[in-house]
Amino acid sequence: MKINIIMKRAVPKDAIIISRIASKTFLETYYDYVEMADLLGYMEQSFNINLLSKEIADKKTIFILVMANEKTIGYAKLNKDKKPRKLKESKSIEIERIYLLKNFTNKGIGTKIVSKCLSIARDCGAKVVWLGVWEKNVLAINFYKKMGFRYFGSSVFRLGKTKHRDILFKKVL
């Protein structure tokens, strides 16, 4: 069966479906590595519907819904207002999240999502797109390398009581 992929900009009412997808994919990724209380705390804080509605309405962020055969299967979040100190280029956009339901991975959809993000970044006048990938997410690291992203540093993030390391990648447009 052919998967018909459509991507469209999210609006605040889409916060409900984004919250569901974010929670499901986040659990799938971190379940074996992080204590459940820490996961649930992060999800409650970061994926609550009120916060997501505000972020979607904010001009500094862009949310893209990814749909397959009219069902939402993922989303991407771009952030125009955040930049690590290690990034020297002045005009940049972060791909803050690409969340795709597990049964839709390895089907070429991730490549389409990244291409859409790069196109949006160009339209916004960015010269560089950057992102952080959890160091234990080897599949994502290899995927971004294949998409032409290059290492430029690392950063630490806290998930509950535990510190984790993100590998920072960038792609010059």
Image (cartoon, rainbow, N blue to C red):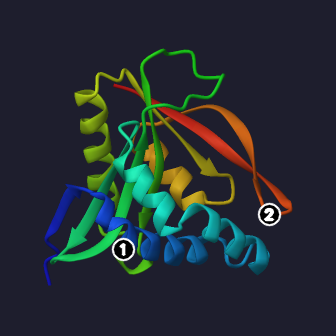
Q: Vertical placement of 50 versus 89: above or below?
A: below
| Residue in the foreground of this view, choosing between 93 and 172 | 93
Residue 51: % across, % down: 50, 58
Q: Residue at x 20, y 56 (%)?
A: 8
Give above or below for 4 relative to 75.
below
Q: Which mark is residue 160?
A: 2
Q: Quadrant of residue 76?
A: bottom left
Amino acid type shown at disc 1: Ile
The answer to which of 11 and 68 lies nearer the viewer is 11
Task: Describe residue 126's horizontal placement relative to residue 2 as left or right.
Answer: right
Q: Of callouts 1 and 2, which one flags the residue occurring earlier in the amino acid sequence?
A: 1
Question: As displayed, is residue 154 above or below residue 103?
Answer: above
View extreme (right): residue: 161
**In the image, residue 30 above or below residue 53:** below
Residue 104 at x, y percent in the picture: 35, 75
Q: What secondary structure is marked by label 1?
A: helix
Residue placed under numbered mark 1 in the picture: 17
Q: Is residue 49 left or right of residue 64?
A: right
Residue 134 in the image: x percent, y percent? 65, 54
Which of these two is toward me, 44 or 77?
A: 44
Quarter of the image holding residue 3? bottom left
User: Badges 1 and 2: C-beta atoms under 8 Å apart?
Assistant: no
**From the image, which quarter does the C terminus lie in?**
top left
Residue 17 position, x and y percent, is 36, 74
Q: Quadrant of residue 118?
A: top left
Look at 44% across and 50% down and name the residue there: 55
Q: Amino acid at mark 2?
A: Gly
